[in-house]
């Protein structure tokens, strides 16, 4: 018979020391916001459903197993019985669970699981409900008949009878005797349910049967209470029976330790180089992407995101596959380098002003910006291309790509990768397996997918090669980001200032070029291949493009001779000269437009006409005027003035303006929701524990001091920045105790930081029932 | 430790374990490999990557190789494995090699040889696998199903001998190239020996023959003028068996015959010609593509030649020109050793995969410039001469129908004048004028007072003129594209191309090859391409030249007006 052991979680908590309370708050930071006023409310908060759910989601497999065992065992349990039902020692895990207030001890030290925890834990270990609880779905008559069939004397009280049946099932000897009389088919049915799930479907389960009317093995089981019909079509195996069939073990196998990494040796130097190369590549690709979109921005889809065709086009232009492109755009957006902006007509994707700053930083700093944004974003590039429930394809940069789990998994996977010794690679399966052990309740398909994506993305972003991480990545995972960047910077190839020109009209930059030189080469030649080196090809079109942008053949020749280590090949010089010749010998300048007319007199008229002043015309040659207004404006103005001007086409021998490189305004990274509250700082924890203690005392001590004393203490605390606890009665007359940190005392009111609310508020001095300094409370 | 302390030594990056990160090779994301030729490790690196990477371009400073599935499978066929390839890439690469690329290389190479064609002691030809899933995958393909028979065991399935080639083609297309281990028939034995009097086999010819023989079947890639016929003769001497030689045309057939008589123990009676003119079947028979692909009422009438003898070796000259029907016939010849000879694996029709599966993998290749450097072929100086059209020609060109434009631009009177000037300039040299349009050639022949060789010139007349040219009786010939292939004009020192088959890159290579044979006086050859400025002629010329520029033969471009000063500087 259980002895009455009156004790609650609150009492257990109250008995703990400051360090233990601090540890609890650190493990379950959600309890801190707001800071509970006293231990009773802390206990209440700790047993709310959301908080318990959050705590359980963070438990590893073994701690969950221990908790499940506790849920299964009759209360109160002790360490020995738990260890026995688990098959391994549960001591350390129990200490943890107790520390997290998921279990408390009664006066005799027995372990008790709070009600909410039981509820949230669900069917622990795949076991059914206790027999007593299960049987009570039957009416009294049927319970009595089950008891009779089991050879028990019904007491007339259904609860008592059910309890007696449960007691029989708990007696291993009597249960064995009963099972010995079961037919082989009945045993088979039981064994099928033994390791869960504990419920089975049975048509016509509701039929009331007893030992005499039972015709099938399952009906025999129902008659003897070894199965209980919970509704018309479902039967369940009572917990006691299930546990017995399992040989007293709640779990088939206890998992006290995290599965080991499955490792294979790799060449760490190679890993570092490969990852370093990928880091440089991803930085360059993001730069190329944004340079491209600055000039030719893709439209934002009506539903948000990037269109299929724009995605394919951009991927082809950057020479990356579409999955990588999705990653690049999502990371660029997460790093606030890319945002939706307005081009006057449509919403388009444009680089932000932050892109310019980013571009000016060293490669390693740019890389750090990208990987940090990637790690912390809830955006999940791997989901793009999949379909949502309505069958709509999820677009990159579009809605519905946020998953709060993503940053959590990324951090966990990075840390776990960094835990593999240098010179070793693990496997994706191993990482997923370990993560499933770490947080089994959180898991599921998405978590496994996220592990795979994280590894793949880490490779693209230059943190890993395959499933081995580089040294900078280890530092990054450990939080030493600056050191990671410095290490990467040292390993990057130095920037070059020369190319090799060849007679087949190509130029090879045998390494990364400074961005200014690279930009100029990109203008005058087409990029044919990228990677460690860049291959440029000069074509008539590319050279003309440079001329269109205002270059002269002298500029091209100058660029080539200055940056080539070898003589400029004759065919290349010839090509440049040939294009220049055919370019119509037109001098290209920075005027916005120009006006050309064979009749010099007309141009003379224009120059003196007051109506044309706004166009800011300038004579370049007898028959040419340059204008500082755009061609459209000049055209329409000249038409207004009665001339009949004709526009010159862009494809001929006239000036073509390059599209402007544009930016949208600075943007913050997209909001992300935190899956886990930030880890509280030590000072906050201390303050919270002290506040709790103060609250405790407030609840037990009546505080009363003369108003003058109150005022003096408040003023003194405001001056010294100390915390006080006060008794306070609000406008509705409700009394409360709070810990406050007064800021100022004025006009009968005190402004103070209220630790209970977590905000600064104003208290009327006359409503303060008492004040006590935090320090004059003796330590408990 | 201390990887972070990478330090600059002589401006080069060194890691702590002393590994230079300054190799000659740069791996690009599009799977091209850039090799810096002036690097001290360049030639060593070239040797190591040549087995698995296709040389795509070899201009003066940086050569470009490409990793393709075919190239990687070629390497597998030659006994290299993925680990070696990855190791070579990592060893010589200056920068980090993208991880995905290495994974892809390993995956691709791993696909070769999962399926093997073998001789089964009881069931004859079978397709066997080391990976049951792959076999299951391919036999479920609709294209494979009709080619295979009974399942012998879970890993083996019977293949009808006649489908051996076809099956290999289909499997290659499915991405699971089969390794052909089924061996070859010896064929009817016939003694053939090399007669090395006054000449010896060059080292690369020996290597090429050995590479081929070791591999069983396959393709040898050598530049024009590098002596591919010798490689063929050496292979025949190795096989000691009756041989069928397939060549492009009758002139080439006579050329082969001439060479074989000179280089081997074979006598007149042992060599047969099977062409439009003659139908001889002898122990060594030389047949033309043309006669083999002649059809009467939709039936190939000369197929019996393939079965006329128990051939021990089949030689394909100019593999890159192999017409489609010959591919189909070759599919039936899979039990015989096959040797393909070519200057380039580039096919304008993109059927490189068929060459791989039906003739065999590439067994040997050497870039032109290497052989030139060894002095076996003459250096060449390529000059494009741009002719500025007259006002009236430009107007006529502008209003010409688009399909007539190339012809018009190729045959302008301005061009003819420039050709005359060039011929005059090289009065002392053996000169060829090569063109596409017959009336243009006739016109040029008349103006220059030179004989014209074209399609309707009789074989006898052709040979007479070639002989006269050879011994220096005449120093100028005007030839149409019949002379593109396999004629031997040892002392041609200058070639002037006036028009071509649009932008055909391999034609340009063939024509340049005409003048690359080493000259008695060691002079370099001169190749002129005369083009009309600002017309499609110029554009096509640019396309044609790309192949040669990529082979390291860079064109200089000069204006016709500047010709007098061409050799002044």
Image (cartoon, coloured by chain):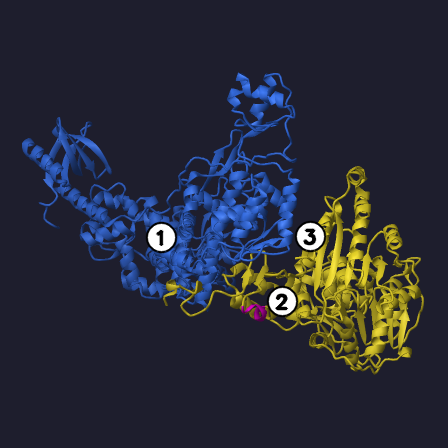
Q: Which chain is yellow?
A: B
Same chain letter for marks 3 and 1: no
Q: Position of residue A340 (x, y in %)?
A: 48, 36
Residue A395 part of the magenta segment: no
Instruction: Say which element carries label 1.
Output: loop
State how many labels appear: 3
Q: Do the residues labelled 3 and 2 touch (CB within 8 Å)?
A: no
The answer to whether one can see residue B154 in this image is no
Question: Callout 3: 10 Å neighbours few (<14), some, many (20+)?
Answer: many
Instruction: Say which element carries label 2.
Output: loop
Instruction: Say which element carries label 3.
Output: strand
Please name which of the two marks, 2 or 1, marks the residue nearer to the observer. 2
Q: Are marks 3 and 1 in contact (CB under 8 Å)?
A: no
In magenta, the rendered stretch is B40-45
Visual hue assigned to chain A = blue
- From the viewer's perspective, is residue B491 above or below residue B385? below
Q: Residue B52 carries which label?
A: 2
Question: Callout 1: 10 Å neighbours few (<14), some, many (20+)?
Answer: some
Q: Residue A58 carries which label?
A: 1
């Amino acid at each position: 018979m259980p002895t009455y052991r009156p004790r609650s979680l609150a009492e257990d908590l109250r008995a703990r020391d400051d360090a233990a309370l601090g540890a609890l708050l650190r493990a379950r930071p959600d309890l801190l916001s707001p800071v509970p006023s006293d231990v009773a409310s802390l206990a209440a908060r700790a047993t709310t459903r959301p908080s318990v759910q959050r705590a359980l989601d963070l438990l590893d497999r073994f701690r969950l197993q221990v908790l499940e065992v506790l849920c299964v065992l009759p209360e109160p349990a002790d360490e020995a019985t738990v260890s026995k039902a688990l098959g391994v020692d549960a001591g350390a895990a129990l200490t943890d669970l107790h520390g997290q207030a998921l279990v408390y001890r009664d006066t005799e030290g027995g372990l008790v699981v709070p009600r909410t925890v039981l509820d949230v834990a669900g069917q622990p270990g795949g076991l059914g409900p206790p027999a007593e609880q299960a049987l009570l779905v039957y009416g009294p008559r049927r319970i009595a008949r089950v008891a009779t069939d089991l050879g028990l004397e019904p007491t007339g009280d259904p609860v008592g009878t059910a309890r007696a049946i449960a007691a029989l099932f708990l007696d291993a000897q009597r249960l064995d005797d009963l099972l010995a009389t079961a037919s082989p088919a009945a045993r088979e049915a039981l064994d099928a349910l033994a390791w869960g799930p504990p419920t089975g479907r049975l048509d016509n389960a509701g039929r009331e049967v007893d030992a005499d009317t039972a015709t099938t093995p399952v009906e025999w089981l129902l008659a003897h209470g070894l199965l209980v019909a919970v509704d018309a079509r479902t039967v369940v195996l009572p917990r006691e029976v299930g546990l017995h069939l399992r040989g007293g073990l709640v779990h088939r196998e206890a998992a006290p330790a995290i599965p080991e990494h499955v490792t294979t040796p790799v060449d760490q130097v190679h890993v570092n180089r490969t990852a370093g190369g990928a880091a440089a590549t991803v930085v360059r690709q993001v730069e190329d992407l944004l340079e491209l979109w600055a000039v030719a921005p893709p439209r934002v889809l009506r539903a948000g995101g990037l269109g299929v065709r724009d995605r394919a086009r951009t991927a082809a232009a950057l020479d990356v596959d579409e999955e990588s492109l999705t990653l690049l755009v999502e990371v660029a957006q997460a790093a606030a380098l890319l945002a939706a902006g307005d081009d006057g007509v449509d919403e388009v994707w444009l680089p932000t002003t932050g892109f310019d700053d980013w571009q000016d930083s060293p490669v390693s700093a740019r890389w750090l910006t990208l990987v940090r944004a990637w790690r912390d974003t809830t955006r999940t590039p791997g989901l793009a291309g999949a379909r949502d429930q309505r069958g709509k394809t999820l677009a990159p940069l579009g809605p519905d790509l946020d998953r709060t789990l993503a940053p959590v998994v990324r951090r966990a996977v990075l840390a776990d990768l960094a835990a593999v010794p240098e010179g070793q690679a693990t496997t994706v399966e191993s990482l997923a397996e370990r993560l499933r052990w770490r947080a089994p309740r959180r898991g599921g398909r998405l978590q496994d997918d996220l592990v795979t994506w994280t590894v793949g993305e880490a490779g693209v972003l230059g943190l890993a090669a395959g499933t081995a991480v580089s040294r900078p990545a280890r530092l990054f995972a450990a939080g030493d980001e600056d050191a990671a960047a410095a290490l990467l910077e040292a390993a990057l190839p130095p920037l070059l200032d020369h190319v090799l020109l060849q007679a087949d009209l190509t130029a090879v930059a045998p390494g990364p070029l400074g961005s200014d030189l690279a930009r100029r080469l990109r203008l005058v030649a087409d990029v044919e291949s990228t990677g460690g080196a860049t291959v440029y090809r000069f074509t008539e079109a590319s050279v003309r493009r440079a001329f269109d942008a205002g270059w002269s053949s002298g500029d091209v020749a100058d660029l080539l001779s200055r940056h080539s280590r070898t003589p400029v090949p004759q065919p290349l010089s010839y090509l440049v000269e040939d294009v220049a010749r055919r370019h119509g010998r037109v001098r290209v300048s920075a005027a916005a437009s120009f006006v050309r007319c064979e009749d010099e007199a007309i141009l003379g008229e224009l120059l003196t006409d007051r109506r044309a002043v706004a166009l800011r015309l300038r004579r370049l040659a007898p028959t040419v005027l340059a204008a500082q207004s755009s061609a459209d404006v000049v055209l329409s103005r000249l038409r207004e003035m009665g001339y009949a001007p004709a526009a010159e086409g862009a494809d001929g021998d006239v000036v073509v303006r390059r599209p402007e490189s544009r930016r949208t305004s600075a943007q913050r990274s997209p909001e992300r929701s935190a899956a886990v509250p930030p880890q509280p700082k030590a000072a906050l924890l201390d303050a919270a524990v002290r506040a709790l203690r103060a609250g405790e005392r407030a609840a037990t001590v009546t505080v009363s001091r003369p108003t003058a004393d109150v005022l003096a203490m408040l003023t003194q605390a405001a001056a010294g920045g100390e915390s006080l606890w006060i008794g306070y009665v609000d406008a509705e007359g409700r009394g409360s105790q709070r810990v406050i940190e007064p800021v100022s005392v004025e006009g009968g009111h005190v402004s103070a930081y209220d630790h209970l609310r977590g905000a600064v508020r104003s208290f009327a001095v006359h409503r303060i029932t008492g004040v006590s300094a935090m320090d004059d409370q003796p330590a408990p | 430790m201390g990887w972070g302390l990478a330090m600059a030594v002589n401006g080069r990056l060194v890691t702590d374990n002393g590994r230079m990160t300054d190799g000659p090779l740069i791996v690009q994301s599009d799977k091209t490999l850039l090799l810096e030729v002036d690097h001290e490790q360049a030639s060593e690196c070239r040797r190591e990557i040549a087995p698995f990477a296709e040389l795509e371009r070899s201009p003066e400073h940086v050569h470009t190789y490409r990793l393709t599935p075919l190239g990687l499978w070629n390497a597998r066929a030659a006994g290299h494995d993925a680990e070696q390839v990855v190791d070579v890439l990592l060893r010589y690469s200056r920068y980090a090699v993208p991880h995905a690329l290495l994974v892809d290389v390993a995956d691709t190479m791993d696909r070769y040889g999962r399926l093997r064609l073998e001789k089964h002691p009881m069931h004859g030809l079978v397709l066997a696998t080391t990976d049951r899933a792959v076999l299951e995958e391919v036999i479920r393909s609709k294209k494979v199903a009709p080619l295979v028979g009974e399942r012998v065991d879970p890993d083996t399935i019977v293949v009808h001998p006649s489908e051996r080639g076809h099956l290999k083609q289909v499997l290659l297309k499915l991405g699971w190239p089969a390794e052909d281990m089924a061996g070859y028939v010896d064929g009817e034995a016939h003694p053939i020996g090399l007669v090395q009097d006054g000449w010896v086999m060059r080292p690369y010819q020996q290597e090429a023959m050995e590479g081929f023989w070791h591999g069983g079947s396959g393709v040898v890639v050598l530049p024009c003028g590098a002596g591919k016929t010798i490689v063929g003769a050496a292979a025949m001497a190795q096989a000691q068996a009756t041989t069928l030689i397939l060549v492009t045309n009758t002139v080439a057939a006579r050329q082969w015959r001439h060479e074989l008589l000179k280089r081997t123990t074979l006598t007149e009676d042992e060599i047969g010609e099977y062409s439009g003119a003659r139908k001889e079947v002898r122990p060594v028979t030389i047949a033309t593509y043309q006669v083999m692909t002649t059809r009467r009422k939709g039936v190939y009438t000369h197929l019996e030649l393939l079965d006329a003898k128990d051939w021990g070796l089949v030689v394909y000259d100019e593999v890159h020109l192999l017409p489609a029907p010959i591919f189909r016939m070759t599919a039936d010849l899979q039990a015989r050793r096959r040797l393909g000879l070519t200057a380039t694996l580039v096919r304008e029709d993109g059927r490189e995969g068929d060459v791989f599966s039906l003739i065999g993998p590439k067994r040997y290749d050497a870039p032109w410039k290497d052989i030139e450097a060894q002095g076996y072929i003459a250096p060449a100086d390529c000059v494009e001469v741009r002719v500025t059209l007259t006002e009236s020609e430009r107007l006529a060109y502008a209003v010409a129908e688009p399909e007539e434009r190339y012809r018009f631009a190729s045959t302008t009177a301005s061009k003819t004048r420039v050709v005359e000037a060039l011929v005059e300039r090289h009065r002392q040299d053996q000169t060829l004028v090569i063109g596409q349009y017959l009336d243009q050639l006739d016109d040029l022949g008349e103006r220059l007072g030179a004989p014209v060789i074209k399609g309707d010139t009789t074989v006898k007349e052709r040979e007479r003129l070639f002989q006269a040219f050879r011994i220096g009786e005449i120093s100028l010939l005007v030839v149409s594209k019949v002379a593109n292939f396999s004629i031997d004009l040892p002392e041609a020192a200058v070639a002037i191309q006036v028009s071509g088959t649009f932008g055909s890159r391999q034609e340009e290579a063939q024509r340049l090859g005409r003048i690359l044979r080493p000259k008695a006086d060691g002079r370099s050859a001169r190749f002129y391409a005369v083009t009309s400025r600002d017309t499609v002629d110029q554009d096509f010329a640019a396309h044609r030249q790309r192949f040669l520029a990529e082979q390291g033969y860079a064109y200089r471009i000069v204006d016709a007006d500047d010709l007098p000063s061409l050799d002044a500087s």
